[in-house]
Image: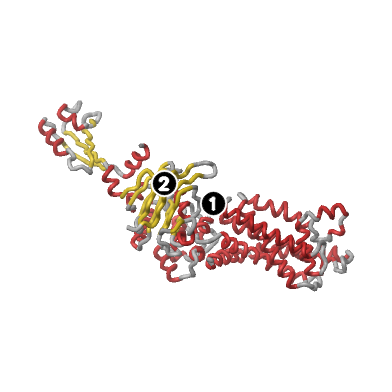
């Protein structure tokens, strides 16, 4: 796959000596959705800002489509769209004028057909002549996306696109993002919501304290780090784990009604068959069994803690 | 050169003025007309001629200068400060625009507005006094360069201001006193010698004098000094803006 954004040894230190990004390296591939996860102040927005030209770079380099973001800023910026975290919009402007303004800033002439289609895609067409202050928060966020897409960019940065929006709208946004991916747009999004990354991202990067802790395919990350828990409800409660089952490192419920068994999903032998077999051999009868898989959130918390 | 980008900023700024026409156009023109009525018609009719020019006509260049300088600074400073205030400067910084293009867009719009106001005031002043302009082309040039220069100054003020109070400090506490004391309503020859020398430290004296020379062929200082002053001021503003964009001061994080 073609690398569309290449970040090498990026360092960003603010004027107050705050180190926002420490020697970060990252390649982003054309057409993928990469989600950058991290707590507040991790460096996610700073990373986007340095790529898009809002923040200066202390050291290192960033290339977009093989062009340097500082030396060849016109070539890099013309293929980038940015949706900021805040609802930064001119409140007294009409939706359509605001979008036309964004398109022209990128050196492109008006294209009413393209802009109308864009508004239709974002369910904004019937609002095109309304002033922005009359729109709801969710609609304003759509306007921000429309503005970012007004010049038909190849790369779209979404800085916490669903922050503060309700569940229904969040799912709408995910659909929009998936549609954009189908159109070939590379999408880089930062988010607090692990569920969001789990639902729409191809790859996940975890940032904390200016360090990129890992970048991995979502599925392989979940598979590699995921642990399943088997809950075995017993017909008769027990006081302690029998000696024969001690090697399984079971966790017994305080009332002795059930125990938990953790196993890795990525391995060939889970140990479930032998556990059930050993239970049978000592006359333990089970009433019910359930499994629970660790979520990306559990993985995220574990990585951040480590 | 990103001409579409420049045009986008320019049109956007001009549209903002049309949305607030009373504030942008009617208010400054009305204020200046009130000056004409009070100082020109009421008090001026009892004043003697200054260098062969009636007092009512004499104050026209000074009043135009006062208004266009204030308007240039106000329009340009608000033009760039408002996007900063509402957070939309991200669009400018992430677009393929150079600092020159951004400045041309904002300063061009601000200068257009104040230049238009200056011309409207000039035309309406003819309702009160008779004015014959000796050097009309030079007058246009001088008016235009003043509008551009003070719009550049306004742009700088808009960038470095952190709140609306700071935005108004320079126009209210520096520009207004300088222009009032720079000979808008009198010639500095009327002042005692000591204050004449002090007045020469006021850059507004050179601008008003130059503009008045275009009207009546008279001025407090030689016209070349006035031209040199305004061009030096223009260059200084351009240099400061270039430095602001180069370092990203109060623009980039």
Of residue A50 and residue A65, the one placed in the foreground of this image is A65
Specify whether B224 is left or right of A1: right
Give the secondary structure at mark 1.
loop
Give the secondary structure at mark 2.
strand
Picture quarter containing residue A275?
top left
Label 1 and label 2 in one chain: no
The residue sitting at 88% across, 64% down in the picture is: B47
Residue A133, percent across and down?
A: 52, 58
| Mark 2 residue crowding within 10 angstroms, few (<14) / some (14–19) / many (20+) | some
Does B115 sit above or below residue A175?
below
* Residue that badge 1 annotates: B252
Of residue A244 and residue A279, the one placed in the foreground of this image is A244
The quarter in which the C terminus of chain A is drawn is: top left
User: Which is in the foreground here, disc 1 or disc 2?
Assistant: 2
Q: CA distance from mark 1 to mark 2?
A: 20 Å
Q: How is the image coloured?
A: secondary structure
Specify whether B253 is left or right of B155: left
Residue B177, percent across and down?
A: 76, 54
The quarter in which the N terminus of chain A is drawn is: bottom left
The residue sitting at 36% across, 58% down in the picture is: A30
Can residue A53 be seen here? The reply is: yes
| Mark 1 residue crowding within 10 angstroms, few (<14) / some (14–19) / many (20+) | some
Residue A135, percent across and down?
A: 48, 59
Specify whether B28 is left or right of A96: right
* Residue that badge 2 annotates: A24
Residue A5, percent across and down?
A: 40, 55
* Chain under numbered label 1: B
* Chain under numbered label 2: A
Does A39 sit above or below residue A248?
below
């Amino acid at each position: 796959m073609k690398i569309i954004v290449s970040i090498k040894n990026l360092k960003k230190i603010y004027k107050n000596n705050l180190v926002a990004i420490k020697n970060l390296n990252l390649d982003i591939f054309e057409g993928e959705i990469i989600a950058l996860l991290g707590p507040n102040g991790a460096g996610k927005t700073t990373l986007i800002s340095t790529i898009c030209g809002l923040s200066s770079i202390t050291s290192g380099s960033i290339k977009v489509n093989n062009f340097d973001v500082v030396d060849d800023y016109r070539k890099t910026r013309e293929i980038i769209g940015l949706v900021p975290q805040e609802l930064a919009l001119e409140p007294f402007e009409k939706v359509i004028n605001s979008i036309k303004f964004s398109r022209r800033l990128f050196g492109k002439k008006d294209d009413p057909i393209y802009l109308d289609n864009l508004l239709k895609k974002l369910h904004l067409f019937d609002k095109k002549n309304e002033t922005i202050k009359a729109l709801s928060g969710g609609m304003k966020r759509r306007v921000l996306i429309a503005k970012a897409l007004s010049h038909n960019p190849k790369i779209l940065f979404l800085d916490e696109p669903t922050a503060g929006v309700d569940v229904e709208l969040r799912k709408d946004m995910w659909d929009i993002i998936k549609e954009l991916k189908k159109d070939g747009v590379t999408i880089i999004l930062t988010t607090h919501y692990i569920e969001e990354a789990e639902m729409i991202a191809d790859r996940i990067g975890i940032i904390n304290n200016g360090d990129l802790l890992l970048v991995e395919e979502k599925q392989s990350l979940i598979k590699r780090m995921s642990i399943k828990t088997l809950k075995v409800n017993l017909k008769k409660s027990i006081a302690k784990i029998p000696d024969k089952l001690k090697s399984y490192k079971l966790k017994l419920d305080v009332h002795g009604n059930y125990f938990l068994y953790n196993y890795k999903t990525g391995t060939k032998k889970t140990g479930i068959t032998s556990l059930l077999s050993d239970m049978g051999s000592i006359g333990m009868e089970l009433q019910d069994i359930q499994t629970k898989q660790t979520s990306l959130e559990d993985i995220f918390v574990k990585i951040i803690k480590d | 050169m990103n001409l579409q980008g420049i045009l986008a900023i320019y049109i956007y700024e001009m549209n903002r003025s049309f949305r607030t026409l009373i504030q942008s156009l009617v208010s400054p023109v009305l204020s200046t007309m009130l000056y004409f009525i009070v100082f020109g018609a009421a008090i001026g009719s009892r004043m003697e001629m200054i260098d062969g020019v009636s007092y009512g006509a004499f104050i026209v260049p000074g009043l135009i200068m006062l208004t266009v300088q204030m308007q240039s600074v106000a329009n340009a400073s608000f033009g760039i400060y408002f996007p900063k205030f509402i957070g939309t400067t991200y669009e400018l910084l992430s677009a393929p625009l150079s600092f020159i293009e951004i400045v041309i867009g904002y300063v061009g719009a601000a200068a257009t507005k104040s230049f238009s106001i200056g011309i409207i005031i000039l035309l309406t002043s003819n309702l009160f006094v008779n004015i014959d302009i000796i050097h009309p082309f030079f007058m246009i040039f001088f008016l235009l360069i003043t509008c551009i220069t003070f719009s550049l100054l306004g742009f700088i003020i808009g960038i470095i201001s952190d709140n609306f109070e700071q935005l108004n400090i320079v126009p209210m506490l520096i520009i207004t006193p300088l222009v009032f004391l720079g000979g808008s309503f009198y010639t500095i020859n009327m002042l005692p010698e000591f204050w004449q020398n002090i007045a020469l430290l006021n850059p507004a004296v050179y601008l008003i004098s130059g503009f008045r020379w275009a009207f009546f062929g008279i001025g407090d200082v030689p016209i070349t000094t006035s031209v040199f002053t305004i061009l030096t001021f223009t260059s200084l503003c351009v240099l400061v803006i270039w430095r602001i964009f180069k370092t990203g001061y109060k623009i980039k994080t």
